[in-house]
Image (cartoon, coloured by chain):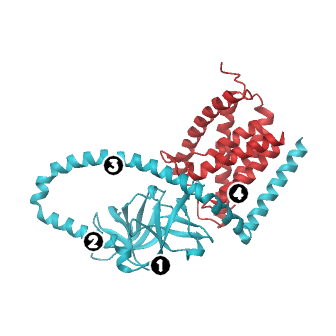
Amino acid sequence: MFDKMIKSSIYGLTAILIAVFFHFAGWLAPVEGLLVTIFSPVQRSVYSVYYGGQNIYSSWVKKRDLIAENEKLRAQLVSLAIDTAKFKALEDENDLLKKEMNFVEENKFKFVAAKIISGVSDPLSQSVIINRGKKDGIEIGLAVIADSGIMVGKVVEAKDDYSKVLLLSDNKSRVAATIQNLDHTVGLVEGQYGLSFSMTNIPQNQEIKDGDLVVTSGLEGKIPKNLLIAKVESVRSVESEIFKTAILKPIISLNSLSDIAVIIP
Amino acid sequence: MPKKNLYYILLACALIFLQLAVVGNLNFFGGRVNLTLVVLIILINLAEFNWVVTFTVVIGLLLDVYSGLPFGILTLSLFISGVTLKILFLNFFTNFSFYSLLLLGLIAVILYNAVFIFIIGLIYFIGLSDYLPGFDYLYKFLWQILTTELIMVAAYYFINSLSRKFKPVFIG
């Protein structure tokens, strides 16, 4: 009995080692591609249903929040009406956001539209799998956008028929970015435990205020300049340190993505 | 017997498919439900050793295709956990009781995560991967224990309503 168990375990371990070797040698790629291709239509449907259900819940939450927000806004309306300077600032910001929203069209970028097939199966990374791959011109390092121009991640693995996209909120995610302030501060946008992201390596002398927009700097060859990433929510600064950190607020939720586009430079 | 075991494996594959398509995206207060472990524990109770090995290898490789981590980590974690749990089951948990199932579930979550963290840590220190679990992983781990045990309770009553394989020794 025990001998039989040892024998089975050795067979199992050998099979794993062979599979890992075949994977890294690239010999398993056709089988993996076939698996994803076979499963993707059903997975996409199930994911859509799940996403739809999530939307119903989000709509309900949104409605509830909107009602509360509406009441709050009504109370603030009187003071806002007389504060023309603030109004002007909001108007400017609105114009800027509109420009960013139409970024892809204005800049005539080539892009590949894609759908998210599923999330990843491990508990550590914040990634998604999309239904476009090398055959569609997808390469590692390309920017992935959602909602007409907001960057949500980067392609980290490209297979023939599908690709893996690392979301900006992943701990491993690093994107060279610029803050749209007077100094045009350059830094790195890093993921924070899958929850949010922050911008690091900002020199202490740079003036950053809450609400400043963060865009891609264009320093990474495959990612175009000025793709909107996030807004500055707060700034964390310790005098004894060389750099300060800006905590960023995502423009859109990275947990409810469905249709995205990959920008081809 | 092999036909019955094949049925378990097919059922397990269907559940894993559910894990990949839905549960992988489903968060309970930041912690993911690990349906694979639940299926593994049930299989450990119902299937023979060879089928546990086959299941962990096949499902592990399938999960690795969809994983953002270096290929093989999930398979190896699942395989080591599966083999150890089956040996534990054959020696200490053979009465199919409600409490032994829950205890096996608890050991499974702890063992799987310990093996996973050990392998991921080893690969990190070798320099093959940039992933290393942070303190937030502890939170996910505790939630995984809770969700796994809850699903195990539901699965126990469900299987008990279909078959008498799990004899309710402690409960009436």
> Which mark is first along the chain, 2 or 3?
3
Give the residue at mark 2. A96
- Mark 4: secondary structure: helix
> Whole-Å distance between the Cαs marked 3 and 4?
40 Å
- Mark 2: secondary structure: helix
> Whole-Å distance between the Cαs marked 3 and 2?
24 Å
Task: Pick whichever, A169 or B18, lies toward us.
Answer: B18
For residue B153, the mark is none
Give the residue at mark 4. B61
Mark 2 belongs to chain: A
- Mark 3 or 4, closer to the camera: 3
Q: Tell me the crowding category of disc 3: few under 14, some 14 to 19, or many 20 or more residues within 10 angstroms, Cα based.
A: some
Badge 3 vs badge 2, beta-carbon distance below 8 Å? no
Residue at coordinates 53% horizontally, 52% vertically from top-left? B25
For residue A62, the mark is 3
> Which mark is first along the chain, 3 or 1?
3
Report which colour depicts chain B: red
Badge 2 vs badge 1, beta-carbon distance below 8 Å? no
